Amino acid sequence: MSGEDHGTGHIIQSLIVNVVIAVAKGAAAVFTGSGAMLAEAIHTSADCGNQLLLLRGVTEAKKLPDEKHPLGYGRNLYFWSFMVALLLFTGGGVFSIYEGVHHWQHPEPVENLALALGILGFSLLLEGWATIGNIKELNARRKAVPFFRFLQETKDSDLVVVFGENAAAVLGLFFALVAIALTKITDEPKFDAVGSMLVGVILVGVAVFLATEVKSLLVGEAADPTIKAAATELVTAHPKIEKLLACITVQQGPGEVFVALKVKIAHGMSGEELIGVINEYEDQLRARCPEVQWCFVEPDFDTGKGREALAEGKLPAPVAAA
């Protein structure tokens, strides 16, 4: 769950599927006058834009560290993922709810319902295929971690966002399909309005979930707990390091983790020996956890203050500048 760069294949697959579906839905919305179909067309078009933003985020996240950004550009992906969540909320969810309310207050007859049902069924098959592909990718990355727990804990924001979009699309298509079918059976256009509102509610819910998850990464979330566990285990096993006094991990981007440690070193070593121990430990940690891109180890005395502060959830007060 530490966030690895697995490429952009899953994003491109969803983008191609959504371009095809958006064209089909847009044509159906024009010929039928269906509010639910219009909401779906707008939703899918927004998804196309969102996936282009994700591709930009993946590209920018791969830029190498420089003087201005010494810890790299990995969080660019989290920024663009957050933007996708905002656009999904406004451009998809809120507008779909508005369209539904408008069609409820001013119902209009829906025409060519057979065409609408056919396109919705075709879109459901394509979106279902793309969603199954996302689920396979999630299963490959999560390994033994429960599915929904992985969605909450993974650092692969691009995969979670694409899965959220596709899952919302499948649910939205299902409700739109039911709404159009009920409109055809009952000849009551208000069912179509309800379908549009349900699509909007689904999109708003997914957008809020995605924004909450990505916000934590954007602000600065701790890396996967297995990295801290590995750091602790290596300290315990090292013959010249007596104790781990403090450890901080931060997820800087997909497959990019920052680690800072404070340790108690065995007495009686020269400066060169101390440097050798620290370098050896850093090499061991990177070999165990390749996603650790930055590792800083500080030797210190075991005064107990650091452990007490960590136990109480407190950090030392910043020193005021002279």
Image: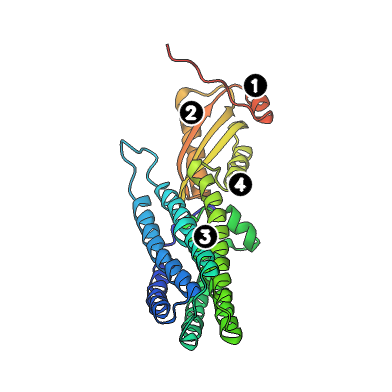
Q: Closer to the N terminus: mark 2 or mark 4?
A: 4
Query: What whole-number distance in Å separates the C-alpha atoms at marks 3 and 1?
Result: 40 Å
User: Residue 73 at x, y = what percent?
Assistant: 37, 45
Query: What whole-number distance in Å separates the C-alpha atoms at marks 2 and 1?
Result: 26 Å
Q: Which mark lies nearer to you, 3 or 4?
A: 3
User: Considering the numbered disc 2 on the image, is that residue within a helix, a strand or a loop?
Assistant: helix
The correct choice, above or below, for 38 with respect to 244 in the image is: below
Mark 1 = which residue?
A: 305
Q: Quadrant of residue 51?
A: bottom left
Q: 287 or 307, which lies in front?
A: 307
Q: Closer to the N terminus: mark 3 or mark 1?
A: 3
Q: 212 or 146, which lies in front?
A: 212
Looking at the image, which residue is at 46% across and 84% down?
111
Compared across the picture, whether 302 is left or right of 2 comes to right
| Dot 2 alpha-carbon crowd within 10 angstroms: few under 14, some 14 to 19, many 20 or more | few
The correct choice, above or below, for 275 with respect to 164 in the image is: above
User: Residue 299 at x, y = what percent?
Assistant: 53, 26
Mark 3 = which residue?
A: 160
